[in-house]
Amino acid sequence: MTTVTKELTSVDENLKKFLQKCDDKKFSNNNTLDSMKFDWCLDVGGMWFATYRNNDIISLSGIHPWENGRHFGTSERSWRALFRGVQIESNSIGLNKHHMQSYCFHSQLPLQIDWVMRQSVNPKDEYIYITTNTENDASGKMTRINKTFFHLEKQNLVKHRGVSEVYNVDQTVWELNIEKYNEIRKHYN
């Protein structure tokens, strides 16, 4: 079955069905528009990306401007990618060392990178971060994803930047190596 990933800017029946499926799976960060901060992400200048199979959303994540990035010595222009990332099915690629079984990492992140670069005056000044929650595991999978990112660091895909308080929750912060990500991602087209 073919999947397609695209920007999502408004609430429709597909999104409502997806939220219900997240609720059924007890994914409390993604079971309502409020819990996933859908409008907030768009209001602050961000964007949502959804992966569809047969017109049904199977994965979703957002990207938004992120002021915390400047605490890590980067420019004022930083972004938080894979915000509220969730999937209800795994990518058919199967488990692999580059985390491409995740629709968020495989299918949405390239579009988020492209989206950021289109917003930019100087793309070399853009920094993209991904955070993993290590304290409040609302899905039951974040601890495992956090460990996965330590393995991705060994491949130079991300750089561990420490822990930062993000909306009153300590999160592990990862700086995305955009060039390395794009290089590796080519092998999964």
Image: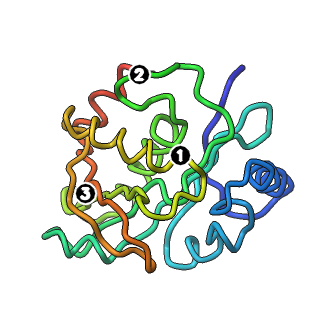
In this rendering, which labeled residue sits more in front, label 3 or label 1? 1
In this rendering, which labeled residue sits more in front, label 3 or label 2? 2
In space, the residues marked 3 and 1 are separated at their CA atoms by 33 Å
- Asked whether, in this view, residue 42 is left or right of residue 97, the answer is right
| Picture layout, residue 16 above or below residue 50 | below
- The residue indicated by pointer 1 is 141
- The residue indicated by pointer 3 is 123
* 10 Å crowding of disc 1: few (<14), some (14-19), many (20+): few
* 10 Å crowding of disc 3: few (<14), some (14-19), many (20+): few
- Asked whether, in this view, residue 154 is left or right of residue 184, the answer is left
Find residue 96 and name its label.
Answer: 2
Q: Amino acid at mark 2?
A: Asn
Q: Position of residue 119 (x, y in %)?
A: 39, 63
Helix, strand or loop under label 3: helix
| Picture layout, residue 69 above or below residue 133 | below
Q: Amino acid at mark 1?
A: Lys
What's the residue at 44%, 48% (across, down)?
143
- Asked whether, in this view, residue 9 is left or right of residue 96, the answer is right
- Depth check: give the residue in front, 124 or 34: 34
What's the residue at 32%, 60% (across, down)?
172
Of the numbered discs 2 and 1, the one sitting upstream in the chain is: 2
Q: Position of residue 135 (x, y in %)?
A: 44, 63
Q: Are marks 3 and 1 in contact (CB under 8 Å)?
A: no
Quadrant where the N terminus sits is top right
